[in-house]
Every structure is written in structure tokens, then in C-alpha cells.
Amino acid sequence: FLGPARASAGEGEEPAAAGSRRPYVVINKVSKSFHGTRVLRDVSFNILPGEVVFLIGPSGSGKTTLLRTINRLETVDDGEITVGGQFVGYQSSPSGTVPVRDAARSRARVGVGMVFQHFNLFDHMTVIENVIEAPVRVHGANRAQARTDARELLAWAGLAEYENHYPHQLSGGQQQRIAIIRAVATRPKLLLFDEPTSALDPELVNEVLDLMRRLAESGMTMVVVSHEIVFARHWADKVVFMEDGEIVQAGSPDAVFNAPDNPRTKNFVHLIE
Ligand code: ADP
């Protein structure tokens, strides 16, 4: 099921008019504070179906928090976020907590998958059990069908031979590729990556980036928090540079990297290259 899987507008919605793609994610004037400190300030941008968006910026600039608000792991104080036409960013309840089960259901409904820096595989489960866990438990998939689909995905990713391995028997690069396949197995329309290669030894980074590139080519809509500038240059449709919770610059990789018209962006790009 990895054909050209460009995210469509939410179910039951009118198709976008020919020639104009309706944004799949709309982030509108989002602000967020932790203990009185603003970590997101009036952040707005859209993501089109099939777009690959890189979020870059110094540590502490709010990239992970923004990713977590899109996935409803964090509430927002102000503004709104919609994914596939569905409202996901919402203001904190008086207790400030997100009802977890509600959030899980909401993520399943809008089709958002997430890949973490530290893989977060279930250590006591084999590779294939990891991959079928969410399809079976969260999405109610038939177990036999989920296994068939998982095998197909693992083969596609070149990981078929590891289906009965446990995570600790695999390299970090293999574990992260399995974490990506686990996220893909829920058939998300949007995949979020939070520094997916920063916990890896340098020689393992490319195998993970290659898999991400193949997903991008298959039409997956992706938001990637990463310092992999070379990858961003080649594969991002849009680069969003954040600093101090604000978007300093957003545009094509060419516009952001080759002609940074903002001194803050220029300084950052020079620092990490
Ligand atoms: P980045 O991903 O760009 O490094 P983060 O979104 O992780 O930035 O963090 C932005 C700011 O928010 C940092 O100052 C961080 O310390 C703070 N922060 C993030 N999460 C929390 C939290 N749960 N509680 C308090 N402060 C937080």
C-alpha cells in the first residue's frame, strides 16, 4: 500500500479544485508557553499534501514542541492546527492535561505517525510484533492481514530477514528503519520525524535517510526536525527555520540555504555546514 499515496483532504470533503492543492496541515498563529516562558510565538505555516517540510533551527528554538502540537502530544495556548481538515491543536484544559486515550484516537483518525530520536521500539517484542501492534490494537486490523502487510513493508524496506529479531539484536540504523516501518504500518497520511538520525553513529545515518527519501518519493507528507542539511537541500520541498519560538524564514531549500536573506538564518546555516 505504498503506491503514490499523496494525502488527500479529509474524508467526506470535496476534492481540491484541479491545479490547486488544499493544504493538508494548517498551523495558524500558534503560541505556547511552558511555565510562563514562550516557546512558540505566533507560528503559522501550511503543509501541502505530499510535501516534505524540514524544521531547522538551534536547540531550544521550539521545533520539537511544534511537532508535538501537530501530533497532539502538547496543547497550544493560542491559535489552531488542523490536519486533514480536522482540528487537532487545541487549548489546554484547566488542568492542562491532554486526555491520552482521546489523543491516541484523534491521531488514528487523522492519520498521523511519528518517529522519535530514540526509536522507542517495544523491547520485549520482535520486529514483526512491533510493526503489527498499532494496526491490530489501535486500528482494529485483522492480525493475519496485519502480518501479511507488515512482511510486505519490511521487504520493501530491505528488512525482511529481521522479522523475528528483537530490537536489542539490531543496529541503531536497523532499529530506526523498523520504527519508521512501524509508523508507516498504520497507513498515516502525515509522518512526523523528531531528529530521526541524531542518536545514530554517523555510518548508520544514510540507511535511515535513504528510507525516508523513498517514503518522500512515494508521496508521503512528512515533517522532519533534523540537522541533516544535505538531505534537506535535496529532498525538502520547504524549509522552515525557527529561532526563539518564531519562524525566522520559510521557503524552498534554495531560498533558505543559498540566498538566506535573514542574518539569523545565514549565521545558523554557516554554523552547521
Ligand atoms: P528544539 O526542538 O528546537 O530543541 P524544544 O521544542 O525541545 O526545542 O524546546 C523549546 C523550549 O521549550 C526549550 O527551552 C525547552 O527547554 C522548553 N520545553 C520543552 N518541553 C518542555 C516541557 N515539557 N516543560 C517545560 N519546558 C519545556
Image (cartoon, grey):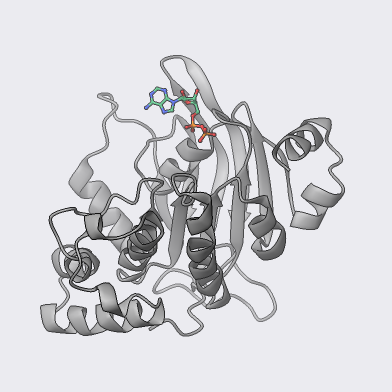
Using the rendered view, name the quadrant where residue 242 is placed: top right
**Residue sitting farthest toward the top:** 36
User: Where does the N terminus fall, quadrant-wise?
Assistant: bottom left
Seen in the image, is 128 located left or right of residue 258? left
Q: Is residue 123 above or below residue 207?
A: above
Give the residue drawn at x 31%, y 84%.
Answer: 152
Q: Is residue 60 above or below residue 154?
A: above
- Closest to the observer: 228 or 137? 228
Q: Is residue 180 above or below residue 58?
A: below
User: Where does the C terminus fall, quadrant-wise?
Assistant: top right
Seen in the image, is 154 located left or right of residue 101? right
Q: Is residue 252 visible?
A: no
- Residue 180: x, y in percent? 38, 63
Give the residue drawn at x 52%, y 76%.
Answer: 6
Q: Is residue 218 visible?
A: yes
- Residue 261: x, y in percent? 87, 40
Give the residue drawn at x 44%, y 29%.
Answer: 77
Q: How many marks on residues?
A: 0
- Residue 16: x, y in percent? 58, 75
